[in-house]
């Protein structure tokens, strides 16, 4: 089992390297280069050459990639083109905000979704199962901004329960923070619970169809015991994967939600940088999002290995 | 035939009706629209009335006309992206499955790596480099999405290519082109059609999402995601203006999902698709 986990960690690191190469390659698609983009109409051959040397653009692409990667490993994310500030100072606080919002949403949605999925699977084909499936299908189809706008309309404009803008600042008290971020978190919860519940149901049902579950039923055990003692331990690994998949989704779903509620997170920050075509910012933000995604998936796979009863008790 | 029609559940009929309605609006939208998409007909955010069914937008343009006209961009761009993504993903997937060996390994590794990055993040990186225009949008989304199509096409073709009729065709000495077009494709169609619905839903929501972020379809063209963004502030005054385009997006997605759900449950399709 340890060997399997180590292999998975190595694979994760390899994936991270590939992802970084791909993101770097993607930012090099620009016809011309950053120097001509910065100088625009005012470019003279001399000023272009000087700026290229300044930014290290006269080096071949693979050398620039290695320099960038080295900078990333040592915490130097480069300088923003738009306002000449270190990217790291701008990026990390916003990344913290995004992770806080995603964590808030995940803490609420994961238990609800897993319980609903379990309940639907146990009562397969029943009224509860069919009803909740139709509701889930509808919620999976609704875009984040539709739900977000409805929540703003009802909860903040008509009943004035919660603020419509998620204004947060450093040193804010926790209850204030909770109040400001509840609407965006609720939007994320509504979108992910449906998806996660449907996938949990499928994962549990595939275990419930196994021969040993039927044996347990035929032994005369109660449904509750069969589900909790026989099915659940074996469904744990797929459920962990479902949860990780959705938390990974949360990381990008948050981009739209941040735009709706004007939340000061990494997603909105990256969208602004794309609009301003600020290459170092976009590169760094993409790498942080990509890394978070890869790391989460690796953790999920490792947890799935650790939770697998067959791997935990090898014969 | 009538027995077959009766076997279609109500939810699927509802889905088919929504999809048909949207296709009609997509084709006829600009002709049906009572006003031009950029024609200013009144004061900003005038509420719905008999003359302007959904009210006016932030510039005093008729919301209903803009919804009808915007279908061309919103549906057209995602339809084009899905079609291109299928014409890239299916041939490559089939070739990977039939050749196996290093061809399969190389293609699959590339696809795996691209899929390691969230689609939205990859798209933002490309849009940063190339700027947002309709061709860039269509090709970026098509390329990113073709990785999902590739995976499904590969799995389905692998399943079919070991069956007796495909084996027979290969022993007869049929060409690769024959194998793909005459043996694999016809038998792979049912799952691929269901997948097309799912991919279209995804690209449609994706294009609308990018437009909502201001990075998708650019003015002066009306499109549903951009209309939500432009009218978003009105919700703070209790006006429904941004809800109409948002509801149009939600309605089409629900419609396609209902049809896909029916296709998948009718047993005509193989599982194995992911979002």
Image: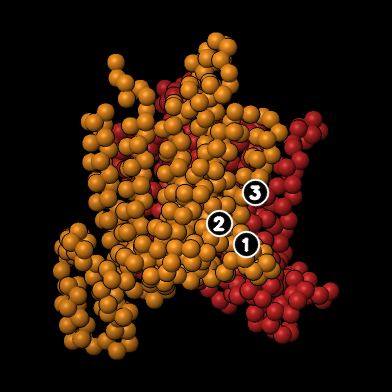
- Residue where numbered disc 3 is placed: A138
**What is the CA distance from the residue labelled 1 to the residue labelled 3?**
16 Å
Name the chain under label 3: A
Which element carries disc 3, helix, strand or loop?
A: helix
Asked whether the residues under the numbered discs 1 and 3 touch, taking CB atoms below 8 Å apart as contact, a structural biologist would say no
Q: Position of residue A237 (x, y in %)?
A: 41, 32
Name the chain under label 2: A
**What is the CA distance from the residue labelled 2 to the residue labelled 3?**
17 Å
x 71%, y 33%: residue: A127
Q: Earlier in the sequence, mark 1 or mark 3?
A: 3
Q: Where is residue A97 in the image (x, y as percent from the top left)?
A: 40, 63
Drawing shade for chain A: orange
- Residue where numbered disc 2 is placed: A186
Q: Which of marks 2 and 1 is nearer the N terminus?
A: 1
Asked whether the residues under the numbered discs 2 and 1 touch, taking CB atoms below 8 Å apart as contact, a structural biologist would say yes
Q: Quadrant of residue B140?
A: bottom left
Q: Which chain is red?
A: B
User: Is B8 on the left-hand or right-hand side of B225?
Assistant: right
Q: Nearer the viewer, residue B29 or B171?
A: B29
x 34%, y 67%: residue: A93
Which element carries disc 1, helix, strand or loop?
A: helix
Q: Position of residue B177 (x, y in %)?
A: 45, 37
User: Is A132 on the left-hand or right-hand side of A11?
Assistant: right
- Residue where numbered disc 1 is placed: A151
């Amino acid at each position: 089992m340890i060997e399997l986990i180590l292999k998975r960690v190595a694979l994760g690191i390899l994936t991270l390297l590939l992802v970084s190469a791909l993101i770097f390659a993607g930012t090099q698609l620009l016809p011309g280069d950053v120097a001509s983009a910065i100088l625009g109409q005012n470019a003279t051959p001399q000023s272009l050459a000087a700026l290229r040397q300044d930014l290290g653009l006269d080096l071949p692409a693979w050398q620039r990639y290695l320099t960038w990667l080295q900078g990333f490993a040592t915490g130097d994310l480069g300088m923003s083109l738009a306002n000449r500030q270190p990217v790291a100072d701008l990026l990390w606080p916003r990344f913290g905000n995004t992770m806080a919002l995603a964590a808030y949403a995940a803490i609420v949605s994961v238990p609800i979704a897993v319980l609903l999925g379990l309940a639907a699977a146990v009562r397969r084909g029943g009224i509860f199962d069919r009803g909740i499936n139709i509701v889930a299908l509808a919620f999976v189809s609704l875009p984040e901004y539709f739900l977000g706008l409805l929540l703003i309309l009802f909860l903040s404009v008509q009943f004035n329960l919660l603020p419509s803008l998620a204004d947060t600042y450093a040193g804010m008290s926790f209850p204030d923070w909770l109040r400001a971020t509840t609407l965006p978190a609720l939007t994320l919860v509504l979108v992910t619970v449906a998806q996660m519940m449907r996938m949990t149901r499928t994962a549990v049902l595939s275990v419930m169809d196994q021969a040993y579950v039927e044996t347990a039923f035929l032994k005369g055990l109660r449904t509750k015991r069969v589900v909790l003692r026989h099915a659940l331990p074996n469904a744990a690994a797929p459920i962990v994967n479902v949860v990780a998949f959705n938390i990974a989704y949360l990381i990008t779903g948050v981009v739209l939600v941040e735009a709706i509620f004007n939340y000061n997170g990494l997603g909105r920050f990256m969208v602004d940088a794309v609009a301003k075509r600020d290459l170092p910012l976009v590169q760094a933000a993409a790498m942080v999002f990509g890394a978070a995604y890869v790391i989460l998936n690796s953790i999920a796979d490792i947890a799935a290995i650790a939770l697998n009863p067959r791997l935990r008790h090898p014969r | 035939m009538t027995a077959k029609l009766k076997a279609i559940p109500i939810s699927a009929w509802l889905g088919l009706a929504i999809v048909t309605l949207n296709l009609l609006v997509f084709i006829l939208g600009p002709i049906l629209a009572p006003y031009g998409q950029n024609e200013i007909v009144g004061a900003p955010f005038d509420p719905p009335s008999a003359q302007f069914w959904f009210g006016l937008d932030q510039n005093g343009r008729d919301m209903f006309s803009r919804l009808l006209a915007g279908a061309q961009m919103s549906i057209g761009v995602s339809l084009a992206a899905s079609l291109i993504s299928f014409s890239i993903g299916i041939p490559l997937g089939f070739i990977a499955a039939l050749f196996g060996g290093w061809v399969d390994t190389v293609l699959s590794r590339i696809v795996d790596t691209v899929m390691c990055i969230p689609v939205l993040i990859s798209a933002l990186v490309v849009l940063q480099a190339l700027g947002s225009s309709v061709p860039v949008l269509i090709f970026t989304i098509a390329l990113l999405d073709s990785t999902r199509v590739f995976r499904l096409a590969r799995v389905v073709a692998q399943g079919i290519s070991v069956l007796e009729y495909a084996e027979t065709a290969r022993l007869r000495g049929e060409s690769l082109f024959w194998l793909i077009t005459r043996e694999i494709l016809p038998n792979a169609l049912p799952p691929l059609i269901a997948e097309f619905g799912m991919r279209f839903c995804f690209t449609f929501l994706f294009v609308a999402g990018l437009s909502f972020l201001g990075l998708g379809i650019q003015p002066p063209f009306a499109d549903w995601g951009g209309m939500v963004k432009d009218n978003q502030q009105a919700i703070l005054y209790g006006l429904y203006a941004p809800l109409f385009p948002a509801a149009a997006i939600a309605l089409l997605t629900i419609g396609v999902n209902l049809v896909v759900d029916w296709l998948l449950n009718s047993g005509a399709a193989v599982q194995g698709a992911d979002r």
